[in-house]
Image (cartoon, helix red, strand yellow):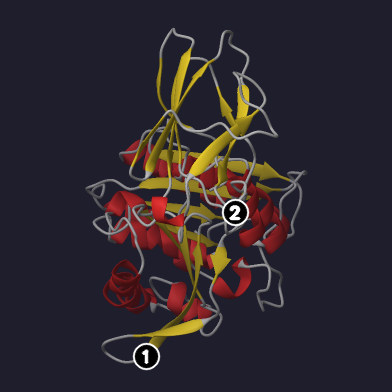
Amino acid sequence: MSESPTTEAIVDSDETTIKVFYPAARGGVTLRGNGAGLDWFKDRAPDHVDGDVSTFVLRIPHYDPVQVKAVRADGKWMVGRNAVIGRGDAATLRPAFDHETGRLTSLHAVDLPWGGALHIRVRLPPSYDEQPDLRYPVLYCQDGQSVWSDGTDPFGTWGLDHVLNELEDIGAVDEFIVVSIDTGLERIPRLSPCPDEKHGGGGAAEHLRAMVDGLKPVIDGYYRTRPGRKDTILLGSSMGGMFSFWATWTRPDIFGGAICLSSSFWWADRYCLKLVSGLSCPAPRPHLYLDSGAAASGFEHDASTRDGVHNTRAMYRALREHCYGPGQDLFLMSWTGHHHNAQSWAARVSTPLQLFFPRRT
């Protein structure tokens, strides 16, 4: 796994402990590095091996960090950047050697018990096949037709796979599973919680039911997920951002948070703002990330350039005044110069991903 180490404790000592978790049946591991008696060209055997856990004890006589990498018995190096270890750390590595990046499945259908289907793709993180004892959070994305670099959306793609590859390579996030749902057909009806006077729609309740009662049990049954609400997050942009907000607000027992980019909070005379103002805060309270692009000029009339910044801020104010704590379970970002398009969402999605899936320390 491409990762910085998980730091469990820091003490005032020159003795540094590194535990490498890797299935013994797949091969033993050694360590290489640039200090504390390590060498990039010579294997350092573990001080102790207990089943799948190899323990290395290093002495770092100063506070300069030491770069290390695990090496498997067949000579393969762990993927990703070097892990950086500091004096006195008690660090854990769960490396991967066979997959440098995550694996993305082809588009396939998940049949719903009551008829119909959801068409999805699943991205598994680099360590998934080599760390059988690990379970992973899940990010459910709307607009699967546009989030991946090989997407088919004529309006552009996010390249989310490239974003995740880079975040994992530098160890900026904990690994997680991504499930994207293709909503290209009948997108507005599927993602709108109520009809709009000009645009119709209003079928979001059925789409939410399909996710909660049809898709999620299949994903949790087939993959090694952490199925609890805190580890189940929604992501969407535009109509998908509004749906992600509404779904999380409606089913906080299922979803622990939502990443809402450029959400269409203008929909149906600002229906979601009225929903927030008229109801008590959901319990348990989900974490929410809201953002929008912002035109460089306040006189800009192009809706794509303005990107709903005023409606997004109105939602932020409603949540703040109602029950939320800014910087605790509510985050707002305004991105100057960003438009209402896939390129802008691709450029900034790494920020909320780090908020919702931070490296554990």
Q: Secondary structure at mark 2?
A: helix
Left or right position of 65 against 180: right
Whole-number angstrom distance, CA of label 2 to CA of label 1: 31 Å
- Type of residue at label 2? Leu
Q: Are marks 2 and 1 in contact (CB under 8 Å)?
A: no
Q: Looking at the image, can residue 266 be seen?
A: no
Looking at the image, can residue 24 be seen? yes
Q: Is residue 323 above or below residue 176?
A: above
Q: Would you say 263 lies left or right of 287 here?
A: right
Q: Secondary structure at mark 1?
A: loop
Q: Earlier in the sequence, mark 2 or mark 1?
A: 1
Along the line of sight, the residue nearer the viewer: 247 or 73: 73
For image coordinates 38% across by 73% down, the residue present is: 194
Residue type highlighted by circle 1: Gly
Give residue 116's mark.
Answer: 1
Q: Nearer the viewer, mark 2 or mark 1?
A: 2
Q: Tag on residue 164?
A: 2
